[in-house]
Image (tube, helix red, strand yellow):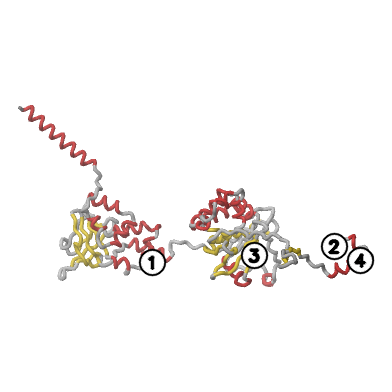
């Protein structure tokens, strides 16, 4: 009998141990539907809930709720939408200032449950941002303030793990205010002290060493009249041009920069893919820029490139020919091209696809390239301009006009005697000088030697 009782007690003890171990294995930050955080997300304090999600503080608050009861002082939507300074709100929403946004939001949360009427006349509480909130209760009126902000809706949401009080305005800690003032007054940005161009010795082409500072009151080095007289001036060195012996320009870096700019700009991935992967145009363009040439790239956007058919791209060398027609060996900006078409009507620009030229004209207050259906408007002006390479976004893929074949001009007589139409080839009339020469040769009976006189 005693053995059976001991067995039952042992089994019950093991059951308790297993239940306690299983409960300890559950995550401590598990949140149920009756949590104060769920109530905040479902409440009418939508602006505060969105800021908490943008600041990625939900996990931090869940861990806090799992261990403590919390108190949240929630400003209403009007305080965050209308009454908040637009510059300060933009400062908080910038990705680089997420630490300031987190500090601001955690300043409204106290890891202790505080309900209205349970506090003394004056008391301070430490927040999750390691700052202190000053709570004060007016004895006569019963009004409750937090850092001199009126609590308009005390105990508006109460849950077993926390309570939410509605307040009149946003609470801003001193550290966040200092960060905003530094950014606005540009104190964190150090200015570069302007310095003059270095002096170069013309004999050995080396930099001259700056003379030691003169003592105040010392006489000048040069006489007064020598200082007033104009000295010898050297002409500036000629700028490095195409085909020079020295590569003064890093064309490869500049081409990489403009391709990266296309990718970051968005909507020109197909153009960048053709330049880098399908063709060797990026390498060729870098060589041209290194030699001193300037280029203007008319870049079709992804919507225009998607309209190209398989036949247009499957022929050997067709991607290169298409891209060559979109590269102008000049440096043009949106302003220069628009001024040209406004003044001259139509402008023909040379392209790398010789001998074809691209036609530009004014249309609808912009620059239109091409003719007829094969045309594109200047859609995204000056995507990249560095003085060597200019990239202008257009909304169509351009193709050169087909050359018209010379045909023999034929004139058809309407009626003949047999009722049939007869074709007569119209010959061009000879010039007066040739007719006179043939007449003179005819007088000497030598005109038969020349085919032009027959």
Q: Secondary structure at mark 4?
A: helix
Q: Position of residue 359 (x, y in %)?
A: 62, 64
Q: Nearer the viewer, residue 439 or 216?
A: 439
Q: Quadrant of residue 142?
A: bottom left
Q: Find disc 4 in the rendering and name its residue.
A: 442
Residue drawn 17% across the image and 62% down it: 116
| Labels 2 and 4 touching (C-beta < 8 A) | no
Q: Is residue 378 left or right of residue 125?
A: right
Q: Quadrant of residue 21?
A: top left
Report, in whole angstroms, how far the alpha carbon at label 1 lies from the one at label 3: 48 Å
Q: Position of residue 73 (x, y in %)?
A: 24, 61
Q: Residues within 10 Å of mark 1 (few under 14, many from 20)?
A: few
Q: Residues within 10 Å of mark 4 (few under 14, many from 20)?
A: few
| Labels 4 and 3 touching (C-beta < 8 A) | no
Q: What's the mark number on residue 452?
A: 2
Q: Find disc 3 in the rendering and name its residue.
A: 348
Q: Is residue 441 left or right of residue 14?
A: right
Q: Who comes first in sequence, dot 1 or dot 3?
A: 1
- The extreme right residue here reads 444
Q: Secondary structure at mark 3?
A: strand
Q: Secondary structure at mark 1?
A: helix
Q: Quadrant of the C terminus?
A: bottom right
Q: Position of residue 7 (x, y in %)?
A: 10, 29
Q: What's the mark number on residue 87?
A: 1
Disc number lying in front (3 or 2): 2
Q: Quadrant of the N terminus?
A: top left
């Amino acid at each position: 009998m005693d053995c059976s009782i001991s067995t039952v007690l042992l089994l019950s003890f093991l059951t308790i141990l297993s239940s306690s171990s299983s409960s300890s294995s559950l995550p401590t930050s598990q949140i149920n539907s009756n949590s104060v955080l769920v109530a905040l997300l479902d409440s009418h304090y939508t602006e505060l809930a969105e800021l908490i999600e943008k600041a990625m503080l939900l996990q931090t608050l869940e861990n806090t709720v799992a261990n403590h009861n919390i108190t949240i002082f929630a400003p209403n939507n009007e305080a965050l939408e209308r009454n908040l300074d637009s510059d300060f709100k933009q400062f908080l929403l910038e990705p680089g200032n997420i630490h300031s946004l987190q500090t601001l939001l955690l300043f409204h949360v106290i890891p202790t449950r505080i309900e209205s009427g349970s506090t003394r006349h004056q008391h301070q509480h430490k927040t999750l941002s390691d700052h202190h909130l000053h709570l004060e209760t007016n004895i006569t009126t019963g009004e409750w303030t937090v850092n001199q902000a009126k609590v308009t809706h005390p105990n508006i949401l109460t849950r077993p793990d926390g309570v939410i009080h509605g307040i009149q305005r946003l609470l801003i800690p001193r550290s966040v205010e200092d960060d905003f003032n530094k950014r606005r007054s540009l104190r964190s940005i150090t200015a570069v002290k302007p310095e003059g161009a270095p002096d170069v010795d013309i004999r050995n082409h080396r930099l001259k060493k700056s003379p030691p500072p003169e003592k105040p009151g010392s006489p000048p080095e040069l006489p007064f009249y020598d200082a007033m007289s104009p000295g010898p001036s050297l002409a500036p060195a000629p700028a490095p041009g195409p085909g020079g012996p020295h590569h003064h320009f890093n064309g490869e870096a500049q081409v990489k920069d403009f391709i990266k700019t296309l990718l970051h700009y968005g909507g020109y991935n197909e153009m960048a893919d053709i330049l880098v992967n399908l063709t060797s145009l990026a390498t060729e363009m870098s060589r041209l820029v290194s030699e001193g040439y300037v280029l203007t790239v008319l870049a079709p956007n992804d919507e225009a490139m998607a309209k190209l058919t398989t036949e247009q791209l499957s022929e050997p060398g067709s991607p290169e020919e298409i891209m060559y027609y979109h590269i102008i060996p000049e440096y043009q900006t949106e302003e220069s091209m628009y001024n040209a078409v406004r003044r001259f009507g139509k402008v023909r620009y040379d392209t790398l696809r010789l001998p074809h030229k691209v036609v530009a004209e004014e249309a609808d207050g912009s620059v239109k390239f091409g003719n007829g259906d094969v045309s594109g408007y200047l859609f995204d002006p000056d995507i990249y301009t560095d003085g060597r390479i200019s990239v202008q976004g257009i909304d169509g893929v351009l193709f050169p006009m087909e050359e018209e074949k010379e045909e023999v001009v034929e004139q058809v007589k309407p009626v003949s005697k047999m009722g049939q139409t007869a074709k007569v080839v119209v010959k061009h009339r000879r010039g007066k000088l040739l007719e006179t020469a043939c007449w003179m040769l005819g007088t000497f009976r030598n005109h038969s030697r020349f085919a032009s006189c027959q």
